Image: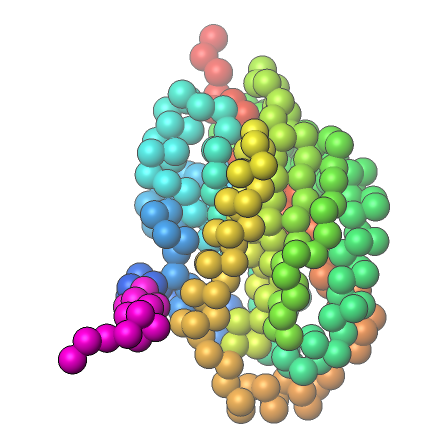
Amino acid sequence: MKFSRCARAACAAVLSAVVSLAAAAPYSFGSRSLQIPAPDSYDATSTQTPKLFELGTAFTPATNRLAEFYVTAADAQALLGGTIDALPRYFQLQVPRALDGKPLSVAEFRANSKTIEGSLEEAMKQAGDQAKDLLDQANAKVEQKFGSDPGVSVSDVGYHGVFRREDWGLFFTMSSQVAAADSPSNRMFCAGAIALIDHQLVYFYSYSLERTPADREWAKRTLNAWVDAVRLANPDDAAVEAQAAASSTGSNFWVRTLVFAVFGGLIGVLYGHWRKRRA
């Protein structure tokens, strides 16, 4: 029997999903556990290159927890070896500490989607000034741990709006000029997502040095694929939805909490000569 083109496409999609699910690893969020597949061809630094994960943690706002940080093996080796100043492309997974392990309702997220989107836009208006303070703290942490202040800074912050809307998440983009001590500056593009994964609020980020329009498209495309794979690995539990819906948080809660999605993406940079200089 011959398969139709649609049937072959469906089989391919199922096989692709199986491959993604097979690569998923368990991550703890409070007392809960989620299966998180790594982005295609990227490694989890928490297990493969712990020093990079520690650096990533330093460049994460105190309000957020870095759940994972993904780079290619070649880029990790190059950055640790000092042959590059900036990772050309990488991914991060963060969670707001106030919501770590706390289930939220998809219905409530959907009802407050306009408020959430508006809070992102408002947060970006003052993001540059607040990011400076956050980066000063991050640079100090790196100097304390590794003996060298990387002097990372951001400027010319741009917010490019929401490019995908779902009942369970919002996808947005932003960019900034990133500089560091003794390093040339570069334009960094970030595609981010605020998403409920089986009712756990998670921040996803895909980063790329911006040299051509293709870099922006790469960040958005890979973010979409990654978030969809994670959603597939963690289907919504109706019992958790009922539990979350019973403890409504209100629109002010979303405004106060989701502003940290902007700062998590804006200062989640890994850039510059962080290694201790030789005399």
Image check: 243 left or right of 260?
left
Q: Which residues are magenta?
A: 1-17
Prevailing secondary structure of the magenta residues:
helix
- x, y (%) of residue 247? 70, 86
Q: In the picture, which quadrant includes the N terminus? A: bottom left
- x, y (%) of residue 109? 69, 75
Image check: 192 left or right of 29?
right
Residue that extends furthest to the left in the rendered view of this protein: 1
Determine which quarter of the picture holds residue 268.
Answer: top right
* Residue plotted at (50% across, 29% down): 86
* Residue plotted at (43% across, 47% down): 70
Give the colour scheme of this rendering: rainbow
Q: Is residue 48 or residue 22 the one in the foreground?
A: 22
- x, y (%) of residue 88? 48, 33
Q: Is residue 35 or residue 19 the one in the foreground?
A: 19
Answer whether residue 88 is magenta in the image: no
Instruction: Using the image, determine if residue 150 lies above or below residue 141.
Output: above
Instruction: Using the image, determine if residue 248 lies above or below residue 251.
Output: below
